[in-house]
Image (cartoon, coloured by chain):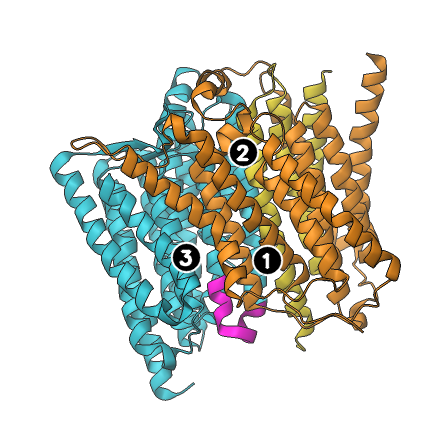
């Protein structure tokens, strides 16, 4: 088994773990962490795919970098929303 | 192409300027929607007279650059975006005190317009991902304009929308892993030359987009979110935001699915489309709230879109494509006026 | 070779264990901490896979900033809801089966991906690198080949800030400033700023760039702000707003400049096409503005716009 295959399998398992966390929760904060785990799985797939060529595929690296910033922005927004949701008496 | 580019850039500049000078935000954005409406008409006229055009952003070759395609379809959708935005902006400008809109509406709606216009012009899978995220975050922020009562709906909308984007991105990563292209027409060529099993990638993309477009059975977030938002925002969400992913679904299935997969997909779309019509219509009948009813009607109406998509994949009749996008246009106009009318009524009655 | 093998095997398993523990940890605080460790391990894996830029970015943005955001969200959680919610095992069984099936299908599909990609954008990108105005491939893709993506991504960041402002959460309890922390942050500041600009400058030739630099700058500002050594930053202040919009604005104006410089009557309009003699300067200018914008936006996202934190 090659390095690429190994990390691709890890990414597949990570995706499942993230999905399970998203469904299971139970806290909103944990669901957001689970979403970040799913994102990590997708980015790991992309990074591993980039390592198939020598040198590594810099185009994919740039896409992952864009994805990372998008993910952190979305996380920040979601966390602000969670903080507000929890502080409202329901 | 220059008019189309300007039609994207005008709302973008308007959004930045509206954030700088917040007192003039309303006028700025209203003027920008009217101006971009003119530009979109010019772009459509250009397509009709001079034929379709493409633009490689940055001037690099296909594959390296993000590509924009201006043809009859994208020009029409660009025009629809600008038209709905100018209608909603005119309504909001005259009614914003009654509608309970804060000044934050203006830059957000301008960003929404820029994101949608870019989505309709682009034919790049990864660029679509970024515009989808932009669209999703702008939509959630707009829903939040109604304050406390929208918190729960907005939270659910945001979480599902993020999960949907990740599904889409995973599908795109798989496609890139197989073929090394992000440009949709080039990818279509590569797939027809060397077909491999890319079912999972396509299903992941489809699941993500169906969730984003609130297509049955992934529509559960839509009624709450659309009903909780202020009336002009509901109009934008129902008329435009769900149409972006629907357009992508059409582009991806009509170009990237091989003949066999297209038939499988068409049955899925025909089935879910009919279910959406029945379930959405039933829920709309049962609800006592006007806005929730209109929101459920969006769920039902999108079923027609799915039916048309399924038939396109089965019959390959160009007339059906025209039918799909004329329906999209008609639904956008109808939903805008319905939500604005409901908003006007609510303001007049005082609840 | 065998040492490498064990390293990857161990790292992979560790990633999975950390992810599972994050999901299953009883306390949220533990979950957050485990997630940060997971992020750092992921950065290590990416470094192993030859993605130095991304390892740097993941450590700074993915683990560092997301961690900071999660911790500050944790601090805002009201105490009353801390008792863990009981979840029944039976209800979750279908979800568990679904997720395992999904992992299996995904793993099977990924396993069948060709080890040698049929086609890649890499050769084309390497060929054009010389005319992109930068020597580092990732920077060339981000700021030249696919600059439109990057512009939209800056807008996503801006939108996150606008959205978070709409739901401004209540103030967390005031902090006691630890004298040692205050001393540390003052001494760390020049170092962090220096490293940030070094990372930015280096991005032209080697791993590094605006986003990593922006994250470092944000780290410096957040530490200062949390120690009460920086006055409150508010979006209402004109200079804060100007700096936050600087990234997008520089990009847009550079784009307009490119339209003007490439303008030829009777020819199609060119958007975001940097003329070669100006490319290096334009890219550096955009990156500088973007770094400041990213740094300040991320700072506001982490610490919010609260007043002085002094007890």
Tag 3 secondary structure:
helix
Q: Which residues are magenta?
A: B141-151
- Residue B16 numbered mark, or none: 3
Mark 2 vs mark 3: in front: 3
- Tell me the subunit letter for badge 2: A
Split into 4 quadrants, where in the image is the C terminus of chain C?
Answer: bottom right
- In the rendered image, residue B218, in percent from the top left (x then y), is placed at 51, 52
Which residue is outermost to the bottom?
Answer: B349
In the picture of the structure, the residue carrying the numbered disc 2 is A63
Q: Is residue C98 something that shows in the picture? A: no
Above/below status of C253 relative to B15: above
Mark 3 vs mark 1: in front: 3
Q: Colour of chain B?
A: cyan
**Residue C28 is a magenta residue:** no
Q: In this figure, what is the number of numbered marks?
A: 3
- Residue A77 numbered mark, or none: 1
**Residue B149 is a magenta residue:** yes
Q: Colour of chain A?
A: yellow
Residue under the point 24% across and 60% down = B34
Apparent side of residue B308 relative to residue C29 in the rendered image (left or right) = left
| Disc 3 to disc 1: CB gap under 8 Å | no
- In the rendered image, residue A48, in percent from the top left (x then y), is placed at 64, 25
| Disc 1 to disc 2: CB gap under 8 Å | no
Apparent side of residue C13 relative to residue C125 in the rendered image (left or right) = right
Q: Colour of chain C?
A: orange
């Amino acid at each position: 088994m090659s390095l690429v295959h190994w990390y691709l399998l890890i990414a597949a398992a990570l995706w499942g773990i993230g999905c399970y966390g998203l469904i299971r929760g139970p806290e909103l904060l944990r669901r957001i962490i689970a979403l970040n785990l799913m994102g990590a799985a997708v980015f790991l797939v992309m990074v591993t795919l980039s390592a198939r060529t020598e040198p590594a595929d810099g185009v994919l690296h740039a896409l992952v970098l864009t994805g990372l910033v998008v993910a952190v922005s979305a996380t920040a927004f979601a966390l602000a929303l969670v903080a507000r949701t929890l502080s409202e008496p329901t | 192409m220059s008019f189309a580019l300007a039609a994207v850039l005008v709302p973008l500049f308007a959004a930045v300027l509206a954030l700088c000078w917040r007192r003039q935000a309303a006028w700025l954005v209203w003027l920008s929607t009217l101006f971009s409406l003119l530009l979109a008409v010019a772009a459509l006229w250009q397509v009709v007279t001079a034929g379709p055009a493409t633009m490689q952003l940055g001037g690099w070759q296909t594959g390296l650059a993000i590509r924009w395609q201006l043809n009859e379809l994208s020009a029409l959708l660009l025009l629809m975006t600008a038209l709905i935005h100018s209608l909603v902006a005119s309504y909001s400008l005259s009614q914003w005190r009654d509608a309970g809109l804060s000044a934050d509406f203006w830059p957000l709606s301008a960003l929404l317009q820029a994101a949608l216009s870019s989505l309709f012009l682009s034919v790049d899978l990864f660029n679509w991902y970024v515009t989808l995220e932009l669209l999703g975050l702008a939509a959630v922020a707009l829903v939040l304009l109604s304050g406390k009562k929208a918190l729960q709906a907005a939270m659910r909308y945001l979480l599902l929308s993020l999960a949907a984007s990740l599904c889409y991105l995973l599908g795109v990563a798989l496609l890139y892993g197989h073929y090394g292209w992000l440009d949709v027409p080039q990818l279509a060529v590569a797939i027809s030359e060397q077909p491999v099993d890319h079912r999972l990638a396509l299903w992941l993309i489809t699941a993500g987009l169906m969730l984003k477009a609130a297509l049955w059975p992934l529509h559960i977030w839509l009624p709450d979110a659309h009903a909780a938002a202020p009336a002009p925002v509901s109009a934008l969400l129902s008329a435009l935001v769900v149409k972006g992913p629907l357009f992508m679904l059409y582009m991806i299935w009509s170009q990237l699915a091989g003949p066999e997969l297209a038939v499988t997909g068409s049955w899925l779309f025909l089935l879910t489309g009919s279910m959406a019509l029945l379930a959405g219509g039933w829920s709309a009948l049962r609800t006592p709230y006007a806005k929730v009813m209109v929101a459920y009607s969006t769920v039902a109406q999108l079923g027609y879109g799915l039916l048309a998509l399924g038939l396109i994949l089965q019959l390959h009749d160009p007339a059906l494509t025209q039918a799909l996008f004329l329906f999209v246009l008609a639904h956008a106009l109808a939903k805008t006026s319905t939500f604005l009318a409901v908003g006007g009524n609510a303001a007049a009655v005082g609840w | 070779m065998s040492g490498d093998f064990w390293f990857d095997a161990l790292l992979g398993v560790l990633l999975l264990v950390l992810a599972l523990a994050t999901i299953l940890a009883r306390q949220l605080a533990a979950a957050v901490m485990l997630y940060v460790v997971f992020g750092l391990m992921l950065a290590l894996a990416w470094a192993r896979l030859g993605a130095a830029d991304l390892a740097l970015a993941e450590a700074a943005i993915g683990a560092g900033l997301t961690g900071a955001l999660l911790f500050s969200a944790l601090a805002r959680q009201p105490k009353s809801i801390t008792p863990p919610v009981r979840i029944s095992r039976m209800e979750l069984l279908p979800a568990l089966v679904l997720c395992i099936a999904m992992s299996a299908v995904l793993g099977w599909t990924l396993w069948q991906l060709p080890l040698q990609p049929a086609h890649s954008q890499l050769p084309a990108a390497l060929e054009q690198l010389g005319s992109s105005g930068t020597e580092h491939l990732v920077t060339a893709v981000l700021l030249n080949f696919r600059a439109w993506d990057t512009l939209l991504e800056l807008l996503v960041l801006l939108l996150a800030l606008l959205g978070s402002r709409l739901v401004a959460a209540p103030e967390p309890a005031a902090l006691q400033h630890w004298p040692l922390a205050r001393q540390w942050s003052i001494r760390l500041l020049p170092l962090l700023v220096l490293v940030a600009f070094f990372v930015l400058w280096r991005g032209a030739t080697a791993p590094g760039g605006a986003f990593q630099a922006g994250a470092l700058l944000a780290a410096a500002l957040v530490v200062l702000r949390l120690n009460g050594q920086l006055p409150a930053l508010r979006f209402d202040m004109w200079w804060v707003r100007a700096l936050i919009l600087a990234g997008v604005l520089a990009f847009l104006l550079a784009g307009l400049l490119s339209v003007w410089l490439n303008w030829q009557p009777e020819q199609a309009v060119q958007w975001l096409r940097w003329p070669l003699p100006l490319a290096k300067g334009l890219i550096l200018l955009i990156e500088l503005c973007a770094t400041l914008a990213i740094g300040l936006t991320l700072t506001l996202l982490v610490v919010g716009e609260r007043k002085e934190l002094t007890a």
